[in-house]
Amino acid sequence: MTYDAIILGAGGAGLMAAATAGQAGARVLVIDHVEKAGKKILISGGGRCNFTNMGTEAGCFLSENPHFAKSALSRYTQWDFLALVEAHGIAWHEKTLGQLFCDGSARQIVAMLLDECAKGRVEVRLSTPVGRIEHADGRFRVGGATAPALVVATGGPSIPKMGATGLAYDIAAQFGVKVVTPRPALVPFTLGARDQGFKDISGVSCPAVARVGDAIFAEAALFTHKGLSGPSVLQVSSYWRPGQAVSLNVLEDAAAKLRDARSRMPRAHLKAALAEHLPTRLADALATRIGLATELGNASDRVLDEVAQTLTDLTFQPTGTEGYAKAEVTAGGIDTAALSSRSMEAREVPGLFFIGEAVDVTGWLGGYNFQWAWSSGVAAGQEI
Ligand code: FDA
């Protein structure tokens, strides 16, 4: 069978590209090896899909080229996607920090995308392995199908049990397209013996400003039996490289709060002062780590300032991350230097496109990654 485009991957990016191209009149085939389209959409946002972020701009993405995403993001914006959601009568709400979720279910987003594909007469073939890709005389052949355009929308290897693979990187290698070394991102950290006291308070969370190098995010942090998680920690994990420390500010204005506690309850110990502001088990773990032996009334300003410094810059030395099994996304991927930022087409291989998470463009937590899937999908879909 001949098509105008073959799209590999029926995730957010692939379906968006397919619908866009199909509705413009192209004959499009989508191939995916799993049995259901949009599996990651279905599990996203706790089943309600955080489908975009109203604050989306290129600065919310990591990439070797921080300018690359600008073109696609500005030509298909968060407002464009929201208009599509509203046109399908899907009720939504803003949860926090510009994050938009379905009121009902993520299934509505998948149904919407499949409906848009149907409007464009897109053929979606599920439970179909991709196999060998051949390329001759300007046409790509996958299985029995051929087309002058091949769009690789197979994402990254995060969450293999959902069907994620590194196929995009293999295809890049086949066609001589460079790849920025992929790594798990938006991923919990594992801690070692040095931080054991915090592994013992698994399940405790608190507001915290997390920092890795220059990357700083203020949201909640969560202590787990393996280490650290929670939104602020996941955000900085995308910037983390092995060997770097992770710092948490768990108590804003710690110095003033400690002095206030000292004047109100001089016979109390540090744990009691901390428990006024933090979960008891965390207060306990912090007091143990800090090891202030005296009652608060006996602590000098200098000592309290040192304690405050520890609380606002509590450092952890991760032994690693929980890896692709738990990473919400994969950072790195197809090198943007090899792609046109307008169309996502490989500069050296006419007709070959890479979109979505497969590309070295990784969003913050909060709907940015789906917006990239939609925007890059539309960019390629308009070109084929
Ligand atoms: P995606 O991975 O969605 O799709 C790729 C498709 O290719 C899949 O259908 C897969 O089966 C197929 N495929 C892979 N290898 C193949 C092969 N070898 N042969 C054939 N087919 C193959 N983002 C966000 O913005 N808001 C959110 O709420 C969330 N929540 C969230 C929760 C969880 C648990 C995870 C794991 C991730 C998120 N994300 C998110 C991230 C978001 O899901 C992700 O960035 C997008 O789904 C990426 O879309 P793509 O279409 O690029 O890849």
Image (spheres, rainbow, N blue to C red):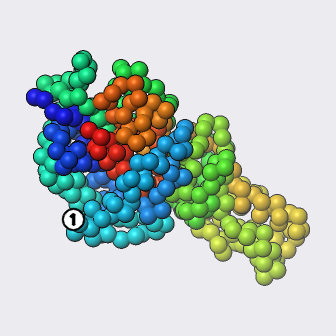
On screen, 260 above or below 226? below
Q: Going by the picture, which residue comes out furthest to the left?
A: 1
Disc 1 target residue: 88
Q: Nearer the viewer, residue 309 or 179?
A: 179
Secondary structure at numbered mark 1:
loop
Residue at x 75%, y 74% (from the top left corner): 257
User: In the visual, does 289 lie left or right of 46?
Assistant: right
Q: Would you call the spot at circle 1 few (<14 residues within 10 Å), some (14-19), or many (20 or more)?
A: some
Q: Nearer the viewer, residue 84 or 173?
A: 84
Q: Nearer the viewer, residue 344 or 289?
A: 344
Residue at x 72%, y 61% (from the top left corner): 311
Residue at x 36%, y 71% (from the top left corner): 93
Query: Where's the N terminus, which quadrant?
Result: top left
- Disc 1 residue type (three-letter): His
Q: Going by the picture, which residue comes out furthest to the bottom?
A: 264
Question: Which percent across, then down, holds residue 350?
Answer: 33, 27
Question: Which percent across, then down, holds residue 255?
Answer: 78, 69
Query: Where's the C terminus, which quadrant?
Result: top left
Q: How many marks?
A: 1
On screen, 51 above or below 70? below
Question: Which percent across, then down, holds residue 95?
Answer: 42, 69
User: In the visual, does 22 lie left or right of 369?
Assistant: left
Residue at x 65%, y 72% (from the top left corner): 277
Q: Nearer the viewer, residue 357 or 347?
A: 347
Residue 159 seen in render:
no
Residue 49 seen in render:
yes
On screen, 322 above or below 338? below
